[in-house]
Amino acid sequence: MVRQAFGEYHTLLEAVSKETAEAILHQQRPDVVITDFNLGDGVGTDVAKVAMSQNPQCRIIFMSGDSSVAEAATAATDLRIKAFLLKPFDLAQFKRACVAAGALAQ
C-alpha cells in the first residue's frame, strides 16, 4: 500500500520492530515515518521520538487497530503527529492521511 501511494520515486525503509526501526533511524533521516502505535517490542511513540530527534521536520503518521489509541497518540503534542489512521483502512484513506500530513502531494 505504501508503494502504491508514494510510487517508485521515493526510498522506502521497512522495519519489523521498534528495535529495527530505531537502528534505521540512527542511520537515516526520513522525511516521513509511518508506524503502528503498538509494536511487538515497544510503542510507536518511541520510534517517533527517535525520528524527531534525528530530523525535527519529520512528519509522523500513526496507525492502530485500537480506537482508544488515537486520542493518546494525538495528545502527545511533543511528537507533532500529522495524521492517525484507524485500521483497517484502504488506499484512499491512506493517501488522504499522507496528504494531510504533508507527506504526499494531492
Image (cartoon, helix red, strand yellow):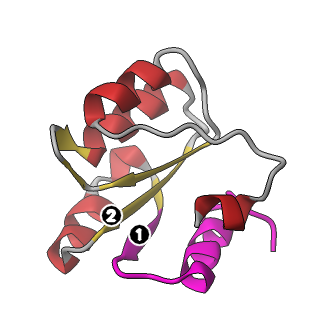
Q: Which mark is residue 68?
A: none
Q: Residue at x 27, y 60 (%)?
A: 73
**Is 84 contained in the magenta span?**
yes
Q: x%, y% of residue 41?
A: 15, 37
From the viewer's perspective, is 7 left or right of 71? right
Label 2 SS:
helix
Q: Is residue 34 above or below residue 71?
A: above
- Circles 2 and 1, Cβ within 8 Å, touching? The answer is yes
Label 1 SS:
strand
Q: Which residue type does callout 2 highlight?
A: Thr
Q: Quadrant of the C terminus?
A: bottom right
From the viewer's perspective, is 99 left or right of 66? right
Other-residue count near label 2 (Cα within 10 Å), few / some / many at <14 / 14–19 / ≥20: some
Q: Quadrant of the N terminus?
A: bottom right
Q: Residue at x 84, y 48 (%)?
A: 9
Q: x%, y% of residue 8?
A: 81, 51
Q: Residue at x 29, y 37 (%)?
A: 17
Q: Which mark is residue 84?
A: 1
Depth check, front residue: 77 or 14: 14
Q: x%, y% of residue 20?
A: 35, 27
Magenta stretch, residue numbers: 83-106
Disc 2: which residue: 74
Other-residue count near label 1 (Cα within 10 Å), few / some / many at <14 / 14–19 / ≥20: many
Q: Which residue type does callout 1 highlight?
A: Phe
Counting the numbered discs, the total is 2
**Is 99 contained in the magenta span?**
yes
Q: Is residue 51 above or below residue 98?
A: above
Q: Quadrant of residue 57?
A: top right
Q: Please state which of the two labelled residues, at mark 2 or mark 1, is closer to the viewer.
A: 1
Q: Residue at x 46, y 32 (%)?
A: 51
